[in-house]
Amino acid sequence: MSSVMSGAAGALENLQPTEVARQCEVAYRKIAIRLIPFLVFLFILAWIDRVNVGFAKLQMLQDLQFSEAVYGFGAGIFFLGYFLFEVPSNLLLEKIGARKTLARITILWGLASMAMIFVKTPMQFYALRFLLGVFEAGFFPGVVLYLTYWFPAARRARINGLFMTSFAIAGVIGGPLAGFIMTTMDGVDGLANWQWLFVLEGIPSVLAGIAVMMYLPEKPANARWLSDAEKQLVTRTIEAENRDPAKHSTLKAAFANSRVWICAAIYFCVVSGNATIAFWSPSIIKELGVQGNLQIGLVSAIPFIAGTIAMVLNGIHSDRSGERRMHCAMATLLAAVGLTLTGLWLHSAMLALVALTLASIGILAAFPVFWSLPSAFLAGTAAAGGIALINSIGNLAGFVAPYMIGWFKTNTGQLSSGLYFVAFLEACATVLVLAAIRGRAAVVR
């Protein structure tokens, strides 16, 4: 293999720059076509299994006599397990590879989701939601790290955007699917509709975990569908970037870098909005007067459809312009405005839905550009640990935001106060991006 790769390297040296650029485009197109749809499919399953509790809530709380505060704490405690095991999981991925790590994660979260049918008490609810977070920990940052093995920095915003459409696609698919299951399966074989929801949406994850081992290549050198020249071209590009002396490559350097902690704070604020639309959109839409589980599911897909389009377009435009900072800041500002208007307009179904859609556009459009920021100054072990650290701390907002909204709803009877709280966090993200993101992370050429 080494002699073949050496021959490919020699052939590349004799190519004109225009031909090298053409081969790059062909290679990256192949990689995107082979990897992104499969990774999107995996994350759709993860996201559905993570947030389907928001639809189960429509009936589960009444059946089990849980309060809104119990639901908010249970929805959010997922992220505590996620936080504790995020960094170890990503460091393990770097050691044993993506296939084993992602397969283990996918199978275990599917089993944990299916086990939700046995919940009877708040403590059981909390325990299984915590375990779901433990098992899923490392999937998202693992994929972000995995994509850095294949794509150079200048291409990552659009690639991240394509992968992160899974957030939005899961919302588009998950809402109507959950509504359909809960409408048609109630009482079948003695199970409640929310119990069927957890079972039927957990099984595909277990099967997908098995498929990971058979389908996913570790790195470009292992991709049978790339030519030897393409493998060499992609590998050399990534290795050259990782040798950049301006990048940190050790775990200690990543943890000591103030930019990593600033990125974690920004991501905390961004995720607060994402957790809000994920866990509370069904309740918000129900509060607007929409009746029936299927109808709620269909209406809840609207903000996610708009967010999907915005996510892709923002990532593409950021790569083409080479600008990161304003693309991220303007998205979080729109999220803050949208959430504020949603709270103000809860009395009007149409206006509130428009505002919720604006919020979703801003929240989802921020993700792909944000994740191009840390990879601009991290490589190797620093990238594995730093990306996981940012994601784990940021995802604590997934605990804080749902819990605080549930707390506000229980104590005030209004959703609007909780929405204002999350809008404030999105505004903080805007300020942090504008004030702290400078230099290489702000512009990529």
Image (spheres, rainbow, N blue to C red):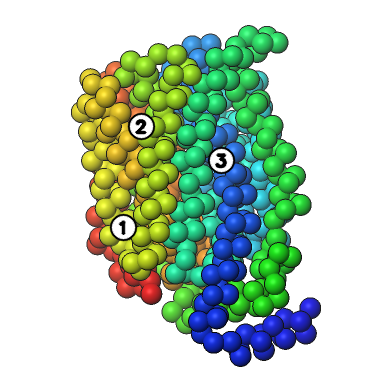
Using the rendered image of the protein, determine whether residue 396 is visible from the camera's viewpoint.
no
> In the image, is 202 to the left or to the right of 300?
right
Q: Which residue is mark 2?
A: 404
> Would you place residue 191 above or below residue 49 in this image?
above
Dot 2: within a 10 Å radius of its alpha carbon, few (fewer than 14), some, or many (20 or more) residues? many
Distance from disc 1 to disc 3, alpha carbons, whole Å, reads 25 Å
Horizontal and vertical percent for residue 442? Answer: 33, 67
Q: Earlier in the sequence, mark 2 or mark 3?
A: 3
Q: Which mark is residue 44?
A: 3
> Would you place residue 270 above or below residue 238 in this image?
above
Callout 2–callout 1 Cβ contact below 8 Å: no
Distance from disc 2 to disc 1, alpha carbons, whole Å, reads 28 Å
Question: Which residue sits furthest left?
Answer: 344
Position of the C terminus, as image quadrant, is bottom left
Judging from the image, what secondary structure is the residue with disc 3 in?
A: helix
Three-letter code, disc 2:
Met
